[in-house]
Amino acid sequence: MRSIVDEKSRILVQGITGNEGKFHTEAMLSFGTKVVAGVTPGKGGQEVHGVPVFDTVSQAVSEKGANTSIVFVPARFAPKAVNEAIEAGIETIVVITELIPQKDSIEFIAMAEKKGVIIVGPNTPGIINVPQKAKVGIMPNHIFKPGIVGIASRSGTLTYEIAWHISNAGLGQSTCVGIGGDAIVGLDFVKLLQMFRDDKETKGVVLVGEVGGKAEELAAHYIKETNYPKSVVAYIAGRSAPPEKRMGHAGAIVMGNVGTAQSKIDAFAVAGVPVAQKLSDITKLLNL
Amino acid sequence: MKLFEFESKKILQKYGIAIPRGHVATNPDQAETIAKELGRPVVLKSQVLVSGRGKAGGILFADNAAEARRIASNLIGSTIKGSVVDSLLVEEKLDIQQQFYASVTIDRQSRRYIVLASSSGGVDIEEVARATPDKVLRHWIDPEVGFGEETATEMVRRISDVDKGAVSKFTSLIVTLHKVTMEYDAELVELNPLARTRTGELVAADARMIIDDNALFRHPEFEGRSQQRIEDTAREAEARRYNLSYVDLSGDIGIIGNGAGLVMATMDLVHHFGGRAANFLDIGGGAQTETIKRGLMTVMSKPEVRAVLVNILGGITRCDVVAEGIVQGLVEAEIKKPIAVRLMGTNEEEGARILRRAGIHVYPDMETAAREVLRL
């Protein structure tokens, strides 16, 4: 999807010299992604899998033309890293880091919005544009096959599981985006649906939601209001989750009457979006 | 992390917000002494972290010290909505003229802190917001602008029936609430009711605070609390020590997987086929042998668990490492229970080989594994 990542994206890895940074830089390169630079303060001049490392983001931008960043920096320092990327003119920032305090996320997302920068995450597996070989994320390469189904998901592994079903059904994926498992995330379902709407490669969309918050209800409302032109199928994880318990993700918690699976399922019913009971039903429900 | 009422009130008091006079009692003697010292009718409030404790009988009034003692001996040790009452907050009974509501919380959708204020205090604010939305005033805070005196005054002026004398007090109070929220990394700071007394004072009759778990590293003052949280079950607390994301549930099938969404989906699938999950365990991404071993032992140690379903889709997580952990966990677990494993992804052949050698069933997809675990 051109509006997020594509073959023209020039990727910068923030925190490239850490274990995760190194491992996923190699995996992204082997997928075919253009990783052009890395940043770790104090380690400028080194190389990781042939990728040059800089001390600052602005050096990486001016010397290598980086325009998209992926952040592997630990939670305590990640907000500063994201701010640096925003200041340096990076257009899309994928924040893999989990456990970032909500106050910090609120602040850097507000700053990004003012400058027109897209924040994906935090606590996201990232984005993969399968046909254009651009992966800015940590998903396992071998599960994804080029195709026509877009995935927007609050969960990492669940995205892989669904992608696997879609690959097996011979449909393949266009772009898959993890919006992140935190309560506060940048890019949300509605903005993604807008992007999928204009994306020629995407013929149908799978929305993978879970208990907590109202993101799914807003997506359902958007689909209904705009008479959304592409086939959408939803799946909601945590239908059997008890209230007031955080189910692994910081954002997966039913508080009072807010965030129940039923409210989301009802909202999709109103919008005419089929909700799959089981993961294996998703491909059957896609009307392509 | 939820704070107890008395902890929240101590913090608010530090910031100059008035709270009722009182102390914490952990036995009837103390309750009696506190009531005697206060020398007037008191309220005894169970210090539990569940909401709706008042309706559940956790908040009672006493006219004198002897009655306070009697009530305390009934409340302490009792269970309110599943939580055992270890202590009571014994406070003077306020002479309440009017009840307000004030809170600062996080609005997920707008990605903003939001200030809420209302003259309908003392009741379920969600209900008020639904029935009479114009009675609840909201202000979404732009993080670059913040929340100051001016905005707060404008807000308070719009609340119906706040008398003139209370406007400036209410204004500075909500500004302070916002300050507390920021400085404590709170997800919620809520005063309900916020009481106006006969003398015109605004007093936090009740207070709730929730601190963002992810920000606890900035708040060493909660260190003891964050290791063993009162809201966790004993098994949840133990799992937390091993950095496992574990939740106790009420069924009899143990559920282990990698990734919160996948574990939830696995739990839902078991329900779909007529079973019930006994717990939720997410081993996370890239888990090592020790993590899986610990996790399996934790899940199996729960007496209600009849059989365990492990669902792994390996990306960063290596299936052979998981398999090794399962085998070690089974060897070390004191009570062994039947187990069904689904393994897919990185190094799955090697993982399946390790498990089969140990006599464990391996299934290629989660639906088959979920159906099978219910038959074990």
Image: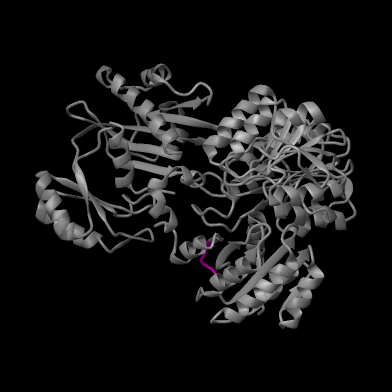
Is residue A227 rendered magenta in the image? no
The image shows a total of numbered marks equal to 0
Q: Position of residue A110 (x, y in %)?
A: 60, 28
- Identify which residue is drawn at 25% across, 19% down: B165
Q: Taking A109 as reference, is A273 left or right? A: right
Most frequent secondary structure within the magenta stretch? loop
Viewer can see residue A83: yes
Q: Position of residue B27 (x, y in %)?
A: 20, 60
Q: Taking B39 as reference, is A95 left or right? A: right
Q: Nearer the viewer, residue B13 or B173?
A: B13
The image quarter in which residue A37 lies: top right
Q: Taking A230 as reference, is B121 left or right? A: left
Viewer can see residue A224: no
Q: Nearer the viewer, residue A187 or A99?
A: A99
- Identify which residue is drawn at 44% across, 29% down: B115
Q: Position of residue A184 (x, y in %)?
A: 58, 39
- Identify which residue is drawn at 73% across, 57% down: B316
Q: Quadrant of the C terminus of chain B?
A: bottom right
The image quarter in which residue B197 lies: top left
Q: Is residue A92 above or below residue B155?
A: below
Q: Is residue A274 above or below residue A120?
A: below
Magenta stretch in the rendered image: B247-251
The colour mode here is: one colour
